């Protein structure tokens, strides 16, 4: 029997960074190699994502995963046993067929992604390779440019501000290691500025400072000051990246900014964001309009896509078909890649490849509910995504990922390279003259 044939698949309930249950899967191969992975969980989800199977009811706020765990230990284990773990496409095709729904609703996207990634880990282990190296094969490995949250907002901070992520991209860094050190300086500087202004109120779901601001723009100006205070030239050495997550407060072309007590139409949103891009060193904007506002996405990209990165997250939900559609209609120029939005490793890879084929930027991303699982760092490096988004620079479910990137960079010695600013449109982050 082949060394890489699947011997057992088991699941257990573990806990995520919000203290909610999630699914961990463990796969053992006939040759003895094992692989393990944990499903993350989003809070501001796109309506077309793969859905988690949750127990509902009163216990654990309805977030229980006993049905998803049972799906792994029962149907999934039965189907996958004996399959070749090195044939990820066949394993994922079996998961997709067994589920049989467009949104993984029967087995649960949390069950399928945990199993799919555990199989991948087991196959890499059987080849005695670190996951990134198994994925890269003969290709050169490039460490991704990180985007790192400094203030958290939106659904991750009780909607204290409307905008979800105020992040930085350390464009001036020459290595992943330097990128993290630069971010650490900005994070510390931002914390001090907030404390001095009496606005430090703890951290949000992804570890960014909880934003006790009076307007969304106040966050932008404080972030720019934090970059300067840390000793960097805004826009040149460190730029700003925003995830508007507009689906959270926009529908049918109406956007309600709760903090500022005003409501805007699609054109008003584009005007406001374009103004921010003129005033602040913004290199990248994610989901500037809601997932149901294709027209708005196109208009925004037509106006700003030439000089900044425009990312589709809720808008593209890690779907290769939607990426191709968005490329054809010029609705954005970059795609966020979240494995659990797709539900299997193969579908995740297909969305990433569709993005690359379209000339899009590709950003592998964590979710707001995370764990110690570091699979996404290996996907970003091994697939050469060029960019990585993991939340902030605090809390161990985030730091586990950043630290894994450092290990990979060191293991590569002189062989690896760092993606750096070249992954962004030329001049991204620079303020117009
Ligand atoms: P989520 O947020 O994981 O809560 O969906 C992350 C994002 O919107 O990028
Ligand atoms: Zn997003």
Image (cartoon, grey):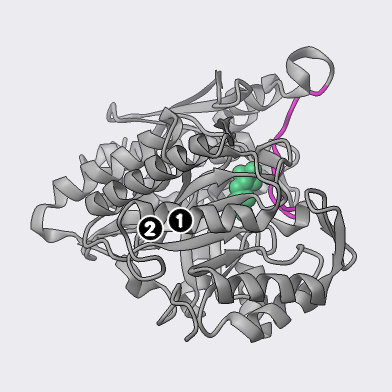
Tell me where residue 422 sits by quadrant.
bottom left
SS category of the residue bearing label 2: helix
Tell me where residue 29 sits by quadrant.
top left
Specify start and end residues of the magenta stretch as a single range: 44-56
Residue behind label 2 places its C-beta within 8 angstroms of ligand 1: no
The residue at the point 58 percent across, 23 percent down is: 73
Rendered view: 342 above or below 270: above
Q: Position of residue 390 (x, y in %)?
A: 46, 45
Q: Which residue is mark 1?
A: 225
Rendered view: 331 above or below 118: below
- Circle 2 packing at 10 Å, graded few (<14), some (14-19), many (20+), is some
Q: Residue furthest left?
A: 414
Q: Position of residue 226 (x, y in %)?
A: 43, 51
- Apparent side of residue 141 relative to residue 114 in the rendered image (left or right): left
The residue at the point 34 percent across, 42 percent down is: 402
Q: Which residue is mark 2?
A: 228
| 88 or 244: nearer the viewer | 244
- Circle 1 packing at 10 Å, graded few (<14), some (14-19), many (20+), is some
């Amino acid at each position: 029997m082949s060394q890489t044939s699947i011997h057992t698949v088991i699941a257990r309930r573990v806990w995520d960074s919000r203290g909610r249950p999630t699914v961990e899967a463990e796969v053992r191969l006939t040759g003895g190699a094992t692989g393990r992975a944990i499903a993350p969980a989003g809070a501001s989800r796109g309506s077309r994502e793969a859905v988690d199977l949750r127990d509902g009811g009163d216990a654990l706020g309805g977030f229980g995963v006993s049905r998803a765990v049972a799906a792994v230990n029962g149907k999934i284990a039965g189907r996958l046993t004996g399959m070749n773990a090195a044939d990820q496409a066949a394993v994922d095709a079996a998961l997709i067929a067994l589920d049989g729904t467009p949104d993984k609703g029967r087995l649960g996207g949390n069950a399928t992604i945990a199993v799919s990634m555990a199989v991948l880990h087991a196959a890499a282990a059987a080849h005695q390779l670190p996951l990134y190296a198994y994925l890269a094969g003969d290709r050169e490995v490039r460490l991704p440019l990180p985007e790192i949250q400094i203030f958290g907002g939106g659904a991750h901070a009780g909607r204290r501000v409307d905008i979800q992520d105020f992040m930085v991209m350390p464009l001036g860094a020459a290595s992943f290691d330097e990128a993290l050190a630069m971010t650490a300086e900005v994070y510390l500087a931002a914390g001090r500025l907030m404390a001095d202004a009496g606005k430090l109120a703890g951290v949000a779901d992804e570890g960014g400072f909880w934003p006790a601001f009076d307007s969304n723009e106040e966050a932008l100006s404080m972030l720019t000051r934090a970059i300067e205070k840390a000793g960097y030239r805004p826009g040149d050495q460190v730029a700003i990246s925003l995830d508007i997550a507009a689906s959270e407060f926009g529908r049918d072309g109406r956007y309600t900014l709760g903090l500022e007590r005003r409501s805007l139409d699609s054109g008003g949103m584009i005007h406001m964001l374009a103004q921010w891009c003129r005033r602040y060193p913004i290199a990248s904007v994610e989901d500037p309009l809601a997932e149901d506002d294709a027209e708005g996405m196109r208009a925004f990209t037509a106006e700003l896509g030439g000089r900044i990165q425009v990312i589709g997250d809720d808008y593209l939900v890690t779907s290769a078909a939607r990426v191709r559609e968005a490329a054809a209609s010029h609705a954005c120029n970059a795609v966020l890649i979240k494995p659990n939005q797709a539900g299997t490793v193969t579908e995740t890879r297909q969305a990433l490849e569709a993005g690359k084929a379209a000339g899009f930027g590709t950003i592998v991303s964590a979710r707001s509910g995370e764990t110690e699982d570091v699979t996404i760092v290996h996907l970003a490096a091994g697939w050469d995504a060029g960019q990585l988004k993991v939340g902030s620079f605090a809390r161990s479910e985030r730091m586990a990922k950043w630290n894994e990137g450092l290990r990979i960079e060191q293991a590569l010695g002189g062989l690896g390279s760092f993606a750096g600013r070249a992954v962004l449109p030329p001049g991204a982050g620079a303020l117009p003259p």
